[in-house]
Structures are given as C-alpha cells and as structure tokens.
Amino acid sequence: MKLVLIKPNIGRREHSLYVDEGRMEPLQLGILAALTPRDVEIVMYDDRMEEIPYDEGADLVAITVETFTARRGYEISKAYRERGIPTVMGGMHVMLLPEEVKNHADSIMIGDAENLWPQLIEDFKRGQLKKEYRGEQPLIPQKSIITRRDIFEGKGYLPITLLQFSRGCKYHCNFCASTAYFKGNHYCRDVQDVVREIKSQKRKLLFFVDDNIVADFEKAKALFTALIPLKVKWVSQGSMDMLEDQELMELMVKSGCLGLVIGFESINEENLEYAAKGANRKRALDHYKKEIQELRKWGLQTWAAFTLGYDGDTKESIIETCKFAIENKFCFAAFNILMPYPNTPLYAKLQEEGRLLYGGNWWLHEDYRFNHAAFIPQNLSPEDLTEVSFWCRRAFNSPWSIFKRALEPHTNLRNPYRFFTYLIYNPLFRKEVFKKQSMRFGLKEAEKING
Ligand code: B12
Ligand code: SF4
C-alpha cells in the first residue's frame, strides 16, 4: 500500500506562485508517518514549495488542513479524487468544521490521530474506510511515539527541529482556535519520550510548537530540568504569567530557552477584556513595563504577538501598538488582524452582531485575501484595518527598525549567537511580509467552493 501525505500551501500571489522561504517541518505529517504500520510505503509532498505529482499513483492520500489552507486542501483533494484516489483529511480545521470538510474528502478524522490512525489504515486495507473517525483526545499525546523525520529530508526546511511537549492551553481567549480544539484542556507528553525524541535526531536547535509550554508550571519545570543535560537551544510559545515563578524562569533559561512567542495581543486593557486574555489581565495598564524588564533580565529574545482590530482599537491605537513594539526592541513581532476562526466564541459573537464579511466563510471565499479583515471593526473600516495592519508589519520590519531594535543589550546583543539569530531571521521575515500580503487562497482562479 502507498500512502501520500500532503501539507497544502495557503495559496498563491496575484500573478505568481508563492514559495514559503521560512517554511518549517510539518510536524503532524511526521507523527502520522510514525503511527503508520511499517509495511505501508510513505511519500510526503509539501505544496509550499514543490509540485504535487498527482499522476504518480497512490492508494490513499492524507491531507492536513488548517482554516487558511482549507481552500487549497480541497483543491488538492479534488484532483486526487478525480483520478479515483481516495483522500482523508484531518487537522485543526476538521475539528472546527467537520460538516464542511466532509464534502471534500472520502474520510475525515476529528481530533488527534494517535488513537485512530492505525485503525483507519486497517479499515482501508480491508476496504472498509469509514466516512468519519472521531475519538477521545489521547490524555498523553505521542505516548512512546517518536516523530518520523526521514520524510522531511531534502525539502529545504529551516534548520530547526519541530516537536511538542504539550497540546492545548488552560486559558480561553475568545479568538483562539486551539482552545476551541482542545476545549481548554492541556495535555502533556511523557518527559522521557521528549528526551528520547531529542536524542533520536542530530539538531541542537529545537522549536517546541506547544500552544503554551508553561500552561502547567510544575510540568514545565520537569521538562526543563530534563532538558538541561541535553545542552540544546530552544524556542516555543508561552503566556506571560510564567514571569511570576522565578524557579520556572531559572530552569527555562538554564535549559537553553532563547525566547518565546508571547501573546501581548494589545496594549489596551479594555481589548484584553474583550479577548478574555486571562494571562495578561491588568498587565497592559502600565504597558507591560514590569514584564518587559523581566524578559530582558532573563535574556529572552521575545517574539511579541499582537492582534489588531478589537472594539477598543482605532487607527491611531494600532499605530501606537506598532511604535510600542519598536520602542521596546522586540526581537520579532507579529501584527495579526483579529480573525474570526470558525467555532470560536469570537466567531459566534461577530456572527450574532451581523459583522462577519464574505458570507461568514472567508476561508473559502474567492474574493478573500490573506491578512485582510474578515469582519466589520467597531471604529474603522475593514479596508483601513487591513491597511494599517500591513503598515505595522512594514514599519516593524523596516531596515531602520531592524537596525534600531538590534541595539538591545540584554537580548539581541547578548552574545554573537543571539545577534546572528537576530540578523538572519529579521530580513527573512521582512521578505515574507511583502510576499504573503493579499495572497489568494488556493491556486485555482475564482472557483466557487461550497462549504
Ligand atoms: C507551529 C505553528 C506555526 C508555524 C508553522 C509550522 C510549520 N510546520 O510550518 C508558524 C509560526 C510559521 C505558523 C504560522 C502561522 N500560523 Co500557526 N501554528 C503553529 C502551532 C503552534 C503548532 C502547529 C503544529 O505543528 N501542531 C502540532 C501537530 C502535531 O498538531 P496538529 O496539526 O493539530 O495535528 C494533530 C491532529 O490535528 C491530527 N492531524 C493533523 N493533520 C492531520 C491529517 C490527517 C489526514 C489526519 C488523519 C490527522 C491529522 O493528528 C495530529 C497528531 O495528533 C499551531 C497551534 C496548534 N495547536 O496546532 C498554530 C496554528 C495552526 N497557526 C495558526 C495560524 C493562524 C497561523 C498563521 C496564519 C498566522 C498568521 N496570521 O500569519 C500563520 C500561517 C502559516 C503559513 N502557512 O504561512 C492557527 C490556525 C487556526 C486555524 N483555525 O486553522 C493555529 C491553530 C494557532 C491558534 N492558536 O489559533 N504557525
Ligand atoms: S493564551 Fe494563547 S494558546 Fe492559550 S487560549 Fe490564549 S491565545 Fe490560545
């Protein structure tokens, strides 16, 4: 049996293809490969930089789907099904909108693959593939399962190994798709499995793609303690309440943490209330002064994530947010428009208020473009929100800002390695800002795709 695994791209630029130069290993496909019985031949294609050879032949095609890759994922599925090859879809978007995805695949898997994937392969081999697989979340993800990384070889991914310690997060931010997926639960792997996984590969630079690696302080401490002897360097995502636990921070730094993506979201307390951003409560009142000092003290190179377009936002407040990020010399920052991801509380709220654009399913709409507003903001037009958010990305990643932000002695200038990291990745992200803006979803011209 031959199984083809696919990671879809978002889409394409208006007049040319989009190749993601900052692409990273698609971890979920490495996990699916590890869960697949050894007698199955596996090939992986990453639509972000290679053409999919539809006519090469396959018995089954497995496609991972997130909301922003759904349209492209459906195109790929259609191309295989037209050739008589069945497809199965899984991933974040399938959990959020199973009824939509069902229309585009022979089978879907709702939730994590660990408990169900081997069964699906068995069913397929016996000619009894079901239309839907839905199981309980595994309480311990990837139990004794080490990601298969041979499928990533030669694909030109950034030289950083993606892996997970935990899934989900204890918080309930109203826009967060992960929380809709994990329903506010937080599941951790066995620390020894993580150690084995790190030892099973050669790289010393790791990206824990956890939603919030510090969602459980004590479990995080156990992980960090186990990482110390491995002498790795790592990055991840974490909420800023971590700064309240000195022991946690000490272990984090000792275990090789270079920095974290931290959801600042907004410098306006009212917006944080709107987003139900529990981890930040009251911290925006003095513009995160104490938190930023602490992050510097620990020498962490922060990737500050902001969300723009809350009801308390105006054009001016958004520009202020960008200035705040430059003034504080963050290593990196994201300025994402608030997105109504399906099945989130934010989506329900905006729907009820009649503020959703593109008929409520922007991810399939032929006119929707990447990084554009998909709802009507309170104090500015959707077009202005799109424009000012793009302005923030351009300003933060401008050569002048890159120069100015480099001069932060505790973080970006801490040592030559940190400075080198800063210098390599800032120009790369700058390039991506321009390439991604206003990308079309899917590769096909204005085709109507049904929900
Ligand atoms: C790492 C990461 C990134 C990395 C990319 C990593 C990569 N490989 O390229 C970076 C930082 C670049 C990134 C960027 C973005 N990301 Co991102 N990212 C993540 C994160 C934190 C982890 C993804 C991951 O590897 N998870 C680990 C795997 C193992 O989990 P999984 O995919 O859920 O897979 C399991 C199951 O779902 C299932 N499964 C998955 N696929 C399949 C397929 C089949 C066939 C089957 C049977 C089962 C199955 O089995 C797996 C194992 O149990 C997620 C959060 C999350 N919890 O997933 C956000 C997340 C996916 N990102 C998100 C977003 C919005 C983005 C951006 C659009 C942000 C932006 N505005 O620019 C960009 C766009 C990316 C792009 N293509 O350009 C959202 C997506 C929301 C949604 N509804 O789809 C998420 C969920 C974050 C969130 N909290 O909302 N991201
Ligand atoms: S803290 Fe981050 S991961 Fe947790 S619910 Fe909020 S946005 Fe999602």
Image: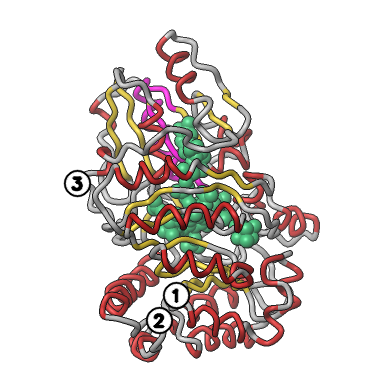
User: Which residues make up the magenta segment?
Assistant: 61-87
Local secondary structure at mark 1:
loop
Rendering coords of residue 387 (x, y %): 53, 77
Q: CB of mark 1 within 8 Å of CB of mark 2?
A: yes
Label 1 CA crowd tier, 10 Å (few <14, some 14–19, many 20+):
many
Is the distance from the Cβ of mark 3 to the nearest ligand 1 atom less than 8 Å? no
Tell me if I can see residue 67 in this picture: no
Q: Residue at 44% of width from left, 82% of height from top?
A: 396
* Amino acid type, callout 3: Gly
Q: Please tell me which residue lies in front, 317 or 30.
A: 30
Query: Which residue of the protein is positioned furthest toward the top in this rendering?
Result: 126
Q: CB of mark 3 within 8 Å of CB of mark 2?
A: no
Q: Earlier in the sequence, mark 1 or mark 3?
A: 3
Local secondary structure at mark 3:
loop
Q: Please tell me which residue lies in front, 246 or 334.
A: 246
Q: Earlier in the sequence, mark 1 or mark 2?
A: 1
Q: In which quarter of the view is residue 21 placed?
A: bottom left
Q: Please tell me which residue lies in front, 36 or 191.
A: 191
* Amino acid type, callout 1: Leu
Give the residue at mark 1.
Answer: 300
Q: Is 340 one of the magenta-colored residues?
A: no
Rendering coords of residue 93 (x, y %): 56, 43
| Cα–Cα span, label 3 and label 2 | 33 Å
Badge count:
3
Give the residue at mark 2.
Answer: 411
Label 3 CA crowd tier, 10 Å (few <14, some 14–19, many 20+):
few
| Cα–Cα span, label 1 and label 3 | 31 Å
